[in-house]
Image (cartoon, grey):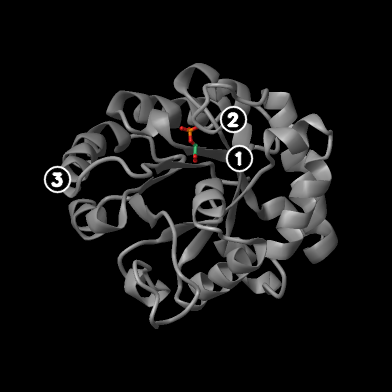
Amino acid sequence: MRTPIIAGNWKMYKTPQEAVEFVQALKEPLSTLTAAERVVCPAFVALPAVAEALQGTDIAVGAQDVHWEDEGAYTGQVAPGMLAGLVKYVIIGHSETRQYQGVTDEMVNWKIKAALRHGLRPIVAVGESLEINEAGQTREFVDRQIRAAFDGVPASDLERIVIAYEPIWAIGTGKSASGEQANTIIGAIRETLAELYGEAPAEAMRIQYGGSVKPENMAEFMSQPHIDGALVGGASLKVDSFVALVRIAIEAKGLR
Ligand code: PGA
């Protein structure tokens, strides 16, 4: 049984102070909802304060990106070693970094390897544009993204990686994929992983859906067999809805 994982991607929202207030409010309602793993991913500047506020809890902290080099002249970037010990997870390849920061499939691969080298757990985001979706090329596109991302990543590291399938046209648009559509593509991702690593490791990997996930549609996604959780933007910014997402995931997976 794969443990569901719900991660809140706060993007460029919440100051350090707001982030700390938020996680303080989250602690109590999440303390009984332990059957799913819960992760918050604040902006870099809020990471130390949020990590401190969550010490002694089992709510994990993640970063939203990381550089692939250990150090160097990369203005504005954060090295993996700087995050080690501070966060457990790091989102890599989010479509907004691919779109606005020119992150390529090759860089995603470098970032994954760098994160793993420093003991971080990557949440690897993949997903197609509306154009590719409408052309009926989603499967091929996502297959290529996965193969590029995992190039040279050894099987022994797989258990430390989570994948997030996020169709770009569903991110922040209020327009989500259907549970069935998302399950089909995530099933196809598992087939690609099985080709690369074998059936058992592919079956064991956790794959989230992301893109306009909210309490109203969470059950639809979580009741799908291939979907192991969600990477959530907008609906993770409110305590009530974040808690509701976790509760619904646990219920839909029959874990309570
Ligand atoms: P959304 O964002 O939930 O606001 O659509 C998801 C994401 O970008 O990870």
Within 10 Å of disc 2 (Cα), the crowding (few <14, some 14-19, many 20+) is some
Residue where numbered disc 3 is placed: 17
Residue where numbered disc 1 is placed: 166
Residue where numbered disc 2 is placed: 170
How far from the left and from the top, in percent, is residue 150? 69, 66
Q: Circle 2 sits in a helix, a strand or a loop, which is it?
A: helix
User: Residue at left 81%, top 64%?
Assistant: 196
**Badge 2 amino acid:** Ala
Tell me the tag on residue 245.
none
**Badge 3 amino acid:** Gln
**Badge 1 amino acid:** Glu
Q: So how many labels did they put on this image?
A: 3
**Residue 62 visible somewhere in the drawing:** yes
| Mark 3 in CB contact with mark 2 (< 8 angstroms) | no
Q: Is residue 175 left or right of residue 225?
A: left
User: Residue at left 39%, top 83%?
Assistant: 72
- Tell me which numbered mark, 1 or 3, is placed earlier along the sequence: 3
Q: CA distance from mark 1 to mark 3?
A: 29 Å
Of residues 118 and 46, the one drawn nearer to the viewer in this rendering: 46
How far from the left and from the top, in percent, is residue 95? 56, 47
Name of the residue lying farthest toward the top: 216
| Mark 2 in CB contact with mark 1 (< 8 angstroms) | yes
Of residues 200 and 12, the one drawn nearer to the viewer in this rendering: 12
Q: Circle 1 sits in a helix, a strand or a loop, which is it?
A: loop
Q: Is residue 36 left or right of residue 53?
A: right
User: Residue at left 53%, top 41%?
Assistant: 4
Q: Is residue 102 left or right of residue 130?
A: left
Q: Circle 3 sits in a helix, a strand or a loop, which is it?
A: helix
